[in-house]
Every structure is written in C-alpha cells, then in structure tokens.
Amino acid sequence: MSPDSIQEIIARQIRALRKARGWSLSQVESMSRGSISAVALGSYERCDRAISVRKLVEIAQFFDVPLTHLLGQAKRVTGPDQITPLVIDLRRMKVISKNLNARGDATLIALTTLVTSIAHRRGDWNAEVMSLRQSDLSTLSLMTMISEEEVKQSLNTMKLLLTGPNHP
C-alpha cells in the first residue's frame, strides 16, 4: 500500500468520524481547545497536509477511537459472517425504544440490549447505524425465542432495517 493511499484512508476515516458526529471543523477546534485546529484538520481531510503520528494519536484520542480505526484496519469479517449484514437504523431504534414500556416488544428490548453490547465489544464507532452479522442475528433469535426469519420480519415491520431482506 502506498503512502498516498494510506493518507487517503486516514483522511476518509477522520472526515467520516467528524461528519457522523455532526461536527464542523471549527467545532472540533473549539472542543479540542485549539489543539486540533480547523485549518489543519480540514487539510488532513483533503490530503493537503501530511499528518504526524503524534497528531494522528491525538485525533484518535479526541474521537475516542483506536488508532487502528483511523488507519482503516477495522476487523475484517471472514467465514459465515460475510453474508450481507442487516444494517439497523440506530436513530430510529432510539426513538421507538423510548416507548419500550408502552410497547413491551420483546424483539426491540432484546435488540437494544444486544446492540449496546455489540457497540462496546466491536468498537462500532458510527452512532447512527450498526450492521448485525449472522452470528448476531442468531443471538437475537435465541434471546427472543423466535426464528431468525421472524426476527428479520419484526425488524422490518419496525422499519429498523436499512439493508438486508426487502431492502437494496
């Protein structure tokens, strides 16, 4: 892998983290108390400026992600989990989870519990969506005591799926 392609990966990862949080360049500068300037961060994101290891570590700490995440070295999935994952809309899940007591939906309760556990275990840093692997779907099926197909149907009915069955 060439140094240019590594720099492009880092640039994409930094921009994706910032955008996922809805922060502007100037907000990052303000929140970092000026240690990460808006001008420099924008330059890193555009690949106009080389980034030092020290600054890369500082940015990783600021976004609270492992350094390997910025290097694009997230865990690669192999084996049966390579099947197209179900992508869950976490924003919608949070909205409908507020009504858990009223709904009493066992699938939603189990999903909320599982997603929280997965986020901590996986270091899935995008707070808007999460992909459920086949093994996660199996766990959810066991937690709810319904078939995997019924779990998928339930998630689809709640309009929580962004990809997977019945979606592009």
Image: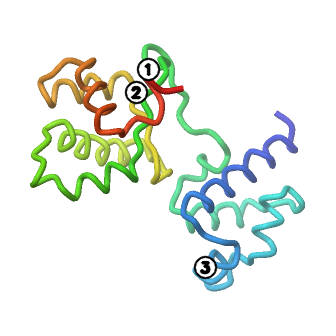
- In the displayed structure, 39 sits above or below 95; it is below
* Callout 1 secondary element: helix
* Quarter of the picture holding the C terminus: top right
> What is the C-alpha distance between the residues marked 2 and 1?
5 Å
Q: Quadrant of the N terminus?
A: top right
15 w.r.t. 90: above or below? below
89 vs 61, left or right, is: left
> Does 97 sit left or right of 28 as displayed?
left
Q: Earlier in the sequence, mark 2 or mark 1?
A: 1
Image location of residue 22, percent across then percent down: 57, 65
Is 56 displayed left or right of 153 in the figure? right
* Residue at image coords 64%, 62%: 57
Q: Which mark is residue 164?
A: none
Task: Identify the residue at horizontal 57%, vertical 68% (top origin).
Answer: 62
Disc 3 to disc 2, C-alpha distance: 35 Å
| Residue behind mark 3 | 32
Query: Pointer 3 and pointer 2: residues touching (CB < 8 Å)?
Result: no
Q: Which residue is mark 1?
A: 81
At label 2, which amino acid type do we have? Arg
The three-letter amino acid code for the residue at tag 1 is Asp
Q: How many discs mark residues in the rendered view?
A: 3
Residue, disc 2: 133
Graded by Cα atoms within 10 Å as few (under 14), some (14 to 19) or many (20 or more), the crowding at tag 3 reads some
SS class of the residue under badge 3?
Answer: loop
